[in-house]
Amino acid sequence: MTRDPHSGWSLYTRSGERKYQNRSERARVLAAIESLELDRALFCLTLAWSGARLSEVLSLTPEQFQVEECLITFRTLKRRCMHVREVPIPPSLMQALDRHYRLRELQAGPGELSCRRLWSYHRVTAWRVVKSVMAGAGLIGAKACPKAFRHSFGVGMVQAGIPITLLQRWFGHARLTTTAIYTEVSGPEEFHLAAKFWRWSAQNGRPGWA
């Protein structure tokens, strides 16, 4: 993310380009993922629905999945000391991961099997997989890189009304001010947030324009 010394991290480049995908762009990305081989599709879907960093998803092993609870345990790699956080993912995605990688079977087997990485890709290969998905969705620039999955996850969670403190925990941010950048949306996303307030107002009394 670009850092503004006065306001902290930003969801926009210095030229004003968005680093996240709006709702229609994210829908196109998810549709493009469906054309991938299953192994690569599950990798990209895990990025899209967990908000995790590329390196964190690449390091995942079977032992980090709580299949029944639909939780992934991530180890934050950027901090000086190891930090662990649990992030929920859609049940359908967890079921697909379990079927393809035999997560529960490996967890019950010899210890070394549950400690092997699910995706043995090199980081460069992972980048290429993500870039091919973004190209298939017709995206270029800052919103077409792997980090855009994380930013889009954050913006989407804010739009869905997820408490910012919970999002902070899922992201593994040390400071709430870092998570707060996901409220800095504009355009259709900003209108969507305002519309939630308008609907709430209409349900709890006469709208101000009536």
Image: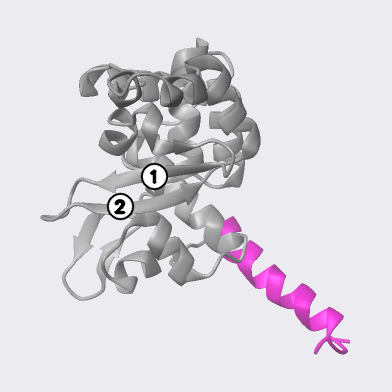
What's the distance in space between the residues labelled 1 and 2, CA to CA?
7 Å
Could you tell me the amino acid type at mark 1? Answer: Thr
Q: Nearer the viewer, residue 1 or 66?
A: 66
Confirm or deny contact between disc 1 and disc 2 (CB under 8 A).
yes
Q: Nearer the viewer, residue 12 or 64?
A: 64
Tell me which residue sits at (23%, 55%) in the image. 2
Residue, far left: 80
Q: Position of residue 64 (x, y in %)?
A: 38, 37
Residue 124 placement, left or right of 136: left
Quarter where residue 192 is shown: bottom right
Residue 42 placement, left or right of 177: right
Q: Earlier in the sequence, mark 1 or mark 2?
A: 1
Q: Which residue is mark 1?
A: 73
Q: Position of residue 114 (x, y in %)?
A: 35, 24
Residue 115 placement, left or right of 94: left
Looking at the figure, which quarter contains the C terminus?
Answer: bottom right
Residue 134 visible here: no
Few, some or many residues within 10 Å of mark 1 (<14, 14–19, 20+): some
Mark 1 falls on what kind of element?
Answer: strand
- Residue 207 highlighted magenta (yes or no): yes
Q: Position of residue 133 (x, y in %)?
A: 45, 22
Location of residue 32 with respect to 204 vertically, above or below: above
Q: Nearer the viewer, residue 116 or 52?
A: 116
Q: Position of residue 138 (x, y in %)?
A: 50, 26
Q: Which mark is residue 84?
A: 2
Q: Which residues are magenta?
A: 188-210
